[in-house]
Amino acid sequence: MKTTMQWTLALLLAAATIPGAVAAPAGGLYTLDTCPVSGQKLGSMGEPVVKNYDGREVRFCCKACVGKFESDPAAWLVKVDAAIVAQQAAHYPLDTCAVSGEKLGSMGEPIDRVVGNRLVRLCCKGCDKGLEKDPAAALARLDAAQ
């Protein structure tokens, strides 16, 4: 059974091929349903505030949280990444490295990275360079496995 997130991603990908349809955000779909600063449910304080940081969409419950986030965005993005990993790990579609194709766990504990608000799992630190060089290829492997 597909999860809500998988269906949402599938619908966004399908909509991208329809003329006049709204495209997915440039930084990737923001899949978290809480504000990274306050922990409040998005939409509980009105329409979420949507910002883009380093090509990634982040949503906040209110403008006050944006200011707190912008005081140290790198630290807050680490927290966002941890939440994305926790959310997406259980439904991760690959049992192989998204870069090398090696079996996850064959070279020690898999390494989790977040690219465009999506979890990407690597077999080893050596694959970090491959991911940095061509993140689109790793995301394409994920898309093909969905």
Image: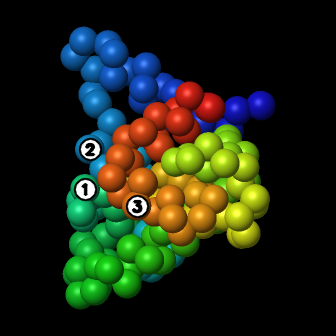
Find residue 20 and report its image quarter. top left
Q: Quadrant of the N terminus?
A: top right
Amino acid identity at mark 3: Lys
Q: Position of residue 56 (x, y in %)?
A: 31, 57
Label 1 sits on residue? 55
Q: CA distance from mark 2 to mark 3?
A: 22 Å
Find residue 25 and report its image quarter. top left
Label 3 sits on residue? 129
Residue situated in front as seen by the camera: 61 or 74: 74
Q: Position of residue 38 (x, y in %)?
A: 44, 79
Give the secondary structure at mark 3. helix
Label 3 environment density (alpha carbons within 10 Å; few <14, some 14–19, many ≥20): few
Q: Earlier in the sequence, mark 3 or mark 1?
A: 1
Residue 80 vs 8, above or below: the answer is below
Label 2 sits on residue? 26
Residue at 28 percent of width and 86 percent of height = 72
